[in-house]
Amino acid sequence: MSTEIQKVEFFRHDLGEAEVMAVKQVLEGPILTTGQVTYEFERRFARYLGVEHAVGCMSATAALHLAYLALGIGPGDEVITTPMSFIATATAICHAGATPVFVDVEPDTGNIDPAAVESAITPRTAAISPVHLYGQLCDMKWLRAIADRHGLAIVEDAAHSLEAEQEGYRSGTLGDAAAFSFYATKGITCGEGGCITVHNPDLDGKLRKLILHGMSKGAADRYSGPYRHWDMELLGWKYNLSNILAAILLPQLDRVEGNRNRREAICQQYEEAFSGLEGIGYPRVRPGRKSARHLFTLWVPPAKRDAYLAALQARGVGVAVNYRPIHLMEFFRETFEYQEGAFPRSEKIGYSTISLPLYPQLTDPEVGYVIDAVRAVWCELGT
Ligand SMILES: *Cc1c(COP(=O)(O)O)cnc(C)c1O
């Protein structure tokens, strides 16, 4: 059966009739920009996560940026985070005018190492930004204890971890703010979008101003009821989520758990198939944790990683690299003088990682095709 397959894309979205109908309804109404559909999405998103407030925005990058601004973190402040993430985790800290301070990760999960966080704290440290890599939550209880002891904020990069849970907490539960992404390849998507969650109503109010030019009234409210003058209270940005994009997101909330369960089943097939291949590894989901299973990554011998990438692509398997460590990107090397060897565990992951296709519409024969391709490449290239 799997012999008929010639190609498995790295990602395919699952948007369909429900999303088309929801967008059509917005297009037939008067408010295309932020309005009731956005607010409805925010309410349902917050309820799903069990947090107090959710503010829809343009991207997770914008969400992280605004979280720092709302928390008053900026020039002179340091934010401790990990280089094993997408660049936005660190660039958002720079956008706020603060300085990213990297620490290394746990070797088995790729998540920030709380012990390393503790030793990186200085009088300038203002926040910790943990990344729940590939969908597994960081050790948030430990990080919260460190933050409380030193009076630090926690800004979670939850771009991978929408469905994650452990010991009763979720993304955003223990942090002061959490940032979510609805980028094209994320678990729920509107092409480009994001959300910030917070517990504190004052932060929520501040975010709602910062997200729209610092104006005292939202755009949707400007067009309803009798005319009222608005003021600009602070220097804000233009990061709001429109009704059109929120309409694409709303129907997907109903499918979140089912889709995660399908990805979990695929991951288990991958893990079972690859655990016998000598020289091949993958990050571990620790016992008792529910991973969102956002990405499945293989760890292959670093010297052969690029050959594996090419060979898998030649067999029609879509691949990606999540991630080459941030501190070795040209901008970070030059601006912060980071060098090779600074974070050996992150670098080891960065040099050996390959992401495989993982999405709910992946069929069993396609999963089999990916597994056969990895096995064949492993035989071909060795370890
Ligand atoms: C996708 C992603 C981001 C950025 O999300 P955008 O919505 O594209 O800004 C940030 N951090 C991580 C870990 C991501 O995977």
Image (cartoon, rainbow, N blue to C red):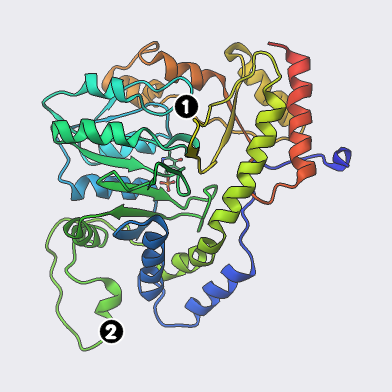
- Judged from the image, the secondary structure of the residue bearing numbered disc 1 is loop
* Identity, as a three-letter code, of the amino acid under mark 2: Ser
Asked if the residue under mark 2 is in contact with the one under mark 1, i.e. CB atoms within 8 Å, the reply is no
Coordinates of residue 295 in the picture (x, y in percent): 56, 38
Res. 318 in view: no
Q: Earlier in the sequence, mark 1 or mark 2?
A: 1
Coordinates of residue 180 in the picture (x, y in percent): 40, 49
**Which residue is painted at 41% across and 22% down in the image?**
106
Residue 224 - label? 2
- Judged from the image, the secondary structure of the residue bearing numbered disc 2 is loop
**Which residue is painted at 62% across and 18% down in the image?**
300
Q: Residues within 10 Å of mark 2 (few under 14, many from 20)?
A: few
**Which residue is painted at 13% across and 28% down in the image?**
124
Coordinates of residue 103 in the picture (x, y in percent): 32, 22
**Which residue is painted at 37% across and 38% down in the image?**
88
Q: CA distance from mark 1 to mark 2?
A: 50 Å
Quadrant location, the N terminus: top right
Is 175 located above or below residue 331 in the figure?
A: below
Q: Is residue 376 left or right of residue 199?
A: right
* Residue 266: quarter of image: top right
Residue 109 - label? 1
Res. 373 in view: yes
* Identity, as a three-letter code, of the amino acid under mark 1: Thr
